[in-house]
Amino acid sequence: MRSALNPGPVRSDTGGVTLRARAPVANSVRFSDLLSALSFSLDLTEGQPMGHALRTNLIAMELGQRLGLSLHQQRDLYYAALLKDIGCSSNAALVFGLFGGDDRQAKGARMLVDWSNYFRAAFYAMAHAAPGASLFERTRRIAELARRGPRVASELVEVRCERGAEIVLQLDLGPAAADAVRQLDEHWDGRGHPRGLRGEEISILARVLTLAQTLEVFAMRGGVEHALALVRQRAGRWFDPLVASACSGVERDIAHWCTLDTHDLLKLVVEREPGGAALLAGPGATDRVARIFAEVVDAKSPFTGAHSQRVTEVAVSIAHERGWSEPDIAELRRAALLHDLGKLSVPNSILDKPGPLTPSEWEVMRMHSYFTERILEHISGFEWLAFASAAHHERLDGSGYCRGLRGDQIPELSRLLAVADIYDALSTRRPYRPALAPEDAITIMEQDRGTGLCPESLDALRGAIEADVPPVEEPGDDEARAA
């Protein structure tokens, strides 16, 4: 059988473009390595710099040790810290619907606001309600936010935290880690969200994690001393006084962690996995994580539906039609599930826009493939898969993005994935048009045969459809704009 993967030199530069060599994808990876790398995608959609979750993890683990948490509690806290924002995409469209503008900026600034202070909450609403819109539109949104009052914050938090806890349980990480994620925005004085839990009603893991993430955000924005002063100020209100007292003497460590790049941060977090006994994720577990993160990506916009899963199914059908080997198909499946991971960096004002994108908006959209590669390359053994997954918008004639690869510079896996991706975009209902019939979608795609799209994969797609691949009719994603 013909291999789906292009072998190549260790690294080569062709036409000014650096190509990544084909390397076998690891059969097993450390679970902590996998989740640590994928946490970068959650940072992006929460409006935080890449590494936010990892720095939060390091702070939380230091506090946990100082508080004398058991090894079992430390392991639960460790994974809860990596996945604390796993439900983040589930409320992105709601945030955009309420505020307009860039949902990532609104969510990032939310961490800086004391919601129990009416005037500070009001200033937050005014600052982030439809920035750049007309005075009438901004006034309308601010009035709606004022009418709904504190319920707005509670609703947004509940959607995110409940979904996050559900995913933690799906990953078999246990109820304690799930509760830590569920209670992430509860406050010691009972004025947090969504349930208004008070004092020791909040799990000790959630109390540690809530303080750790707040400390990280303020340390990165205003320095460690400023962040610690804020912790002392909010002790007894936001934070458990005992947990706040454990922060004494952590200044030097936090300052150091704030200087590390993403690779060094990830290495440190993986090394500090509690107990020294690393959990390994085999192919089955890795694919399960990939499916969950595909769902996280698709949940960001109501127009993406189950896009990643559908693209995966179409890509696998094409590969079977072409006679690819099972190992190659397994690698393709993983790449297809994760190909749009970088879309978590795109604001919903672009993803959910009902009309054409402006040139500047297209630039933001095109960057999603760059972020897909940046995130996945942090997983040891996934470096080549990161490159191939991100190359699904490259075109044979070099007019694609984001590297401008052409011809044989584009991995064959990426060429096949491009066909599946565009087919799903065209075969899916959009706000401004109905889903195209399979034959109509292929007719449009045939216009790019040999110039943009791989002829062999186009032929295989047609063969798979004729073999009764069911048409796709769920809401799709923004790739339809390119088509």
Image (cartoon, rainbow, N blue to C red):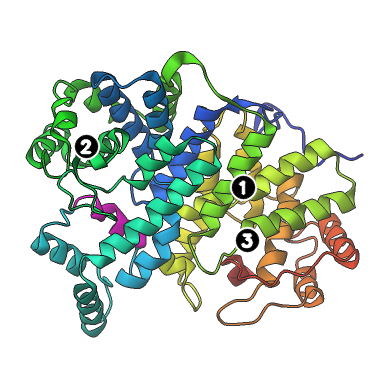
- Residue type (three-letter) at the residue carrying disc 3: His
Give the SS element for disc 3: helix
Q: Nearer the viewer, residue 177 or 346?
A: 177
Q: Is residue 94 above or below residue 32?
A: below
- Give the spatial CA distance, label 2 vs label 3: 36 Å
Q: State the residue at coordinates (33%, 56%).
A: 157
Q: In the image, which residues are magenta? A: 103-112
Residue that carries the numbered disc 2 in the rendered image: 215
In this rendering, position of residue 293 left or right of residue 451: left
Which percent across, then down, holds residue 303?
Answer: 54, 69
Membership of 105 in magenta stretch:
yes
Q: State the residue at coordinates (50%, 55%).
A: 343
Membership of 126 in magenta stretch:
no
- Residue type (three-letter) at the residue carrying disc 1: Arg
Give the SS element for disc 2: helix
Q: Nearer the viewer, residue 193 or 420?
A: 193
Tell me which label, 2 or 3, sits earlier in the chain.
2
The answer to whether mark 2 and mark 3 are in CB contact below 8 A is: no
